[in-house]
Image (spheres, rainbow, N blue to C red):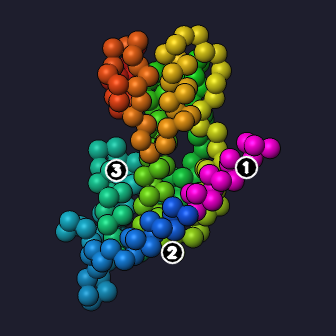
Amino acid sequence: MTRIIRKMIGILLAVAITATVGTAAENHGSKKTASDGAEPSYMGEPLSYWLRFIQDRDKNNMDLALDAIRELGPDARSAVPELTQIVAEPSAPIEIGVDKRSVIAFKIRSILLRSDAIDALAAIGEAATPSTVPLIQWELTVRVVHRSIRNTADDELFVDLVYRPEAQFRVSVLRSSGISTGALLSPECLHS
């Protein structure tokens, strides 16, 4: 029962945050729309340019493309289907005690990509309402599973991944690998 209540609180919190961020983005006033009705642009490039990076899952330009969408806010409404697809993609939970560090790094990058897509949807605001069901499904998705913890590092990794906000994922769990506290999980850090 407590678990269900926690999930419901999480969902309500996610909806409230999404609404707040969406409203703030709408009021930000940083629209890059041409007055003649042309396609909105960011850093001199049209929205379609940024959407290609998202469609191609271009790792080198994905962050910048998502920044563009967040900056464009409601004018980036045509990005909603792509962003919704990112959120809705199937994902396997991180299995502590089973997954290798490189697999954990891959899964964390996937979680962070979804988090960034959700932020972009929030910036778009009301036009992103078609993404509501995938957003709720993602909120209810199990992201970390406690399988077979064999050492202190795995136990600490589990605690950090479960109890820290997913947008941060700056964990101090790789002490056994010599990684300093607060290290960002990256493929380099997780090879052990």
Q: Residues within 10 Å of mark 1 (few under 14, many from 20)?
A: few
Residue 133 position in % (x across, y down): 65, 61
What residue is rendered at 62% in x and 52% in y?
10
As helix, strand or loop, the secondary structure at mark 2 comes to helix
Query: Among all residues in the image, which is located at the extreme left?
Result: 44
Which mark, by number, is residue 188?
Answer: none
- Disc nearer the start of the sequence (1/3): 1
Residue 13 position in % (x across, y down): 58, 57
**Type of the residue with mark 3:** Met
Give the residues drawn in magenta, as a range: 1-15
Residue 17 position in % (x across, y down): 51, 61
Residue 62 position in % (x across, y down): 34, 50
Circle 2 is placed at which residue position? 127
What residue is rendered at 27% in x and 89% in y?
36
In the rendered image, which quarter contains the C terminus?
Answer: top left
Query: Among all residues in the image, which is located at the extreme bottom?
Result: 36
Circle 1 is placed at which residue position? 5
Residue 81 in view (yes/no)? no
61 falls in the magenta region: no
Q: CA distance from mark 1 to mark 2?
A: 29 Å
The quadrant where residue 24 appears: bottom left
As helix, strand or loop, the secondary structure at mark 1 comes to helix
**Type of the residue with mark 2:** Ala
**Type of the residue with mark 1:** Ile
Circle 3 is placed at which residue position? 62
Q: Residues within 10 Å of mark 3 (few under 14, many from 20)?
A: many
